[in-house]
Amino acid sequence: MIPDLHRSVREGYHPPVRDQQKAPIGRPRGFDADKALEQAMRVFWGQGYEGASLTDLTDAMGISRTSMYAAFGNKEDLFQQALQRYTDGPAAYVPRALAEPTARQVATAFLRGSVQATTRPDSPAGCLGVQGSLAAGEPGRSARDTLAAWRNSGIALLEERFQRAVDEGDLPAGTDPGLLARYLMTVANGIAVQAAGGAARADLHMVADMALRQWPPS
Amino acid sequence: MIPDLHRSVREGYHPPVRDQQKAPIGRPRGFDADKALEQAMRVFWGQGYEGASLTDLTDAMGISRTSMYAAFGNKEDLFQQALQRYTDGPAAYVPRALAEPTARQVATAFLRGSVQATTRPDSPAGCLGVQGSLAAGEPGRSARDTLAAWRNSGIALLEERFQRAVDEGDLPAGTDPGLLARYLMTVANGIAVQAAGGAARADLHMVADMALRQWPPS
DNA sequence: GCACTTCCGCACCGATCAGTACGGAAATAA
DNA sequence: TTATTTCCGTACTGATCGGTGCGGAAGTGC
């Protein structure tokens, strides 16, 4: 099954409840799992699921293979957790955009956020949700399907938001919220591909502005 | 060096000159290199450069590893040739779109063509030029860079075409042909991502129409 | 027929893949 | 201290990676 990675967007973020006693038993973990996961996320982001070897990952995480398996499961589990971290971190512009007051502002914040997130000079270019695994051989199918579901989940969030805008009269009656949502996600995905190819942030901002120019009137 | 894969678009297509004598010397090749390359292209298209193993490729091509190396060089060379075939085949809608009489028709044909090409039921979903290699580990860097250059070359072709449209008065003076070109390629790339994730052809056509709705007036 | 050239299936190469067995070290609770 | 529990570095597994050496078979021009 594919976990619901955008759950936190709908229900609010609740960090996992730690055990009451600070030291459970035995030797405590010798590394910061959060920092390690952050590094793993960046490797998957820059090299994709299939292009990231366990050696690449554990080297970046600063831990041994054994520690990685003990802490995160296996490569596939690690990828899922890295994607969750990506959702709550670099992709947090999505829930922020959804919280904007009008549909037009939602769309603008969504596309501007996607340009910013895919062209940060201190992070890999592009979007983990796109380039993490778009086409893959047999061993990468699961990651590919997870990302497709992740993108569809983003479309669903946008659609719900635009449906609300229609209901509130913020968007003209008869507007198709699903089409608006898919349109925005398509442009954002294209921006991610362009960013992965090295397109400049300023150029992509102009593209995003152009994509918003025909937004339905408020 | 990255070969100029869109050369044939500018100079017209000239098939390579075969030797005059039909049978050069020795035993002739026992398979159809064109058919084999077609199959290799489809494997790269569906699984990406890194996701396509030599075994996957040669199985689909119906030849042995040795024959593949003798006929095409190595995996990287095979990928380049597969991309060239993709350019001349499934991506031939690009030069066809460029030949349309007006800029608006060029844009329409380009996006419609990209939807058709990425959602053909008898071919892998998506675009080889996008999902062939977006993010990759060290061994796939060359393929990734080749595809980025391929996409940029497409943008350049569109830009030249729109510059001509501006010069001819088909587009308003002051229009930025580079921005129009990058905008269209961005939308097409997004369509490719959506198609790779299983989006329906009809939905993507609506997205393409929406992206064209704010095209500058003729 | 001959001599020659090329094709291509089989078996193999070292390197790397994801994943694991093991055991000493370290930190806890008693 | 002692017993217990967990951590994690080393070394290894079988499988697969891209790429090759070899040699018999098959087709060519003469």
Image (spheres, coloured by chain):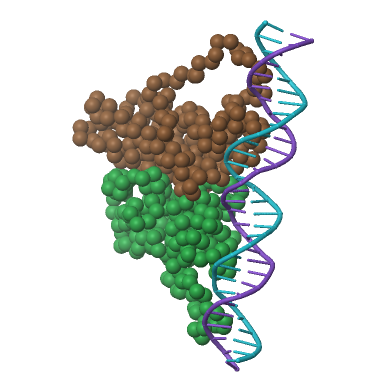
Chain colours: A green, B brown, C purple, D cyan
Q: Residue at x 55, y 39 (%)?
A: B44
Question: Which residue is at the front of the view, A177 or C5?
Answer: C5
Q: Residue at x 56, y 35 (%)?
A: B74
What is the count of numbered marks? 0
Where A143 falls versus B108 (above or below)?
below
Where residue B37 appears, as percent x and y from the top left, is: 57, 30
Question: Which residue is at the front of the view, A77 or C5?
Answer: C5
Where residue A91 appears, as percent x and y from the top left, is: 40, 59
Location of residue A110 by image quarter = bottom left
Where A62 falls versus A149 (above or below)?
below
Q: Residue at x 30, y 41 (%)?
A: B214
Where residue B103 appears, as percent x and y from the top left, is: 32, 30
Q: Residue at x 61, y 40 (%)?
A: B54
Whether residue A171 is visible to the viewer of this picture, yes or no, is no
Left or right side of A37 for D17: right
Left or right side of C2 for A201: left
Where residue B2 appears, as percent x and y from the top left, is: 42, 34
Q: Quadrant of the C terminus of chain A?
A: bottom left
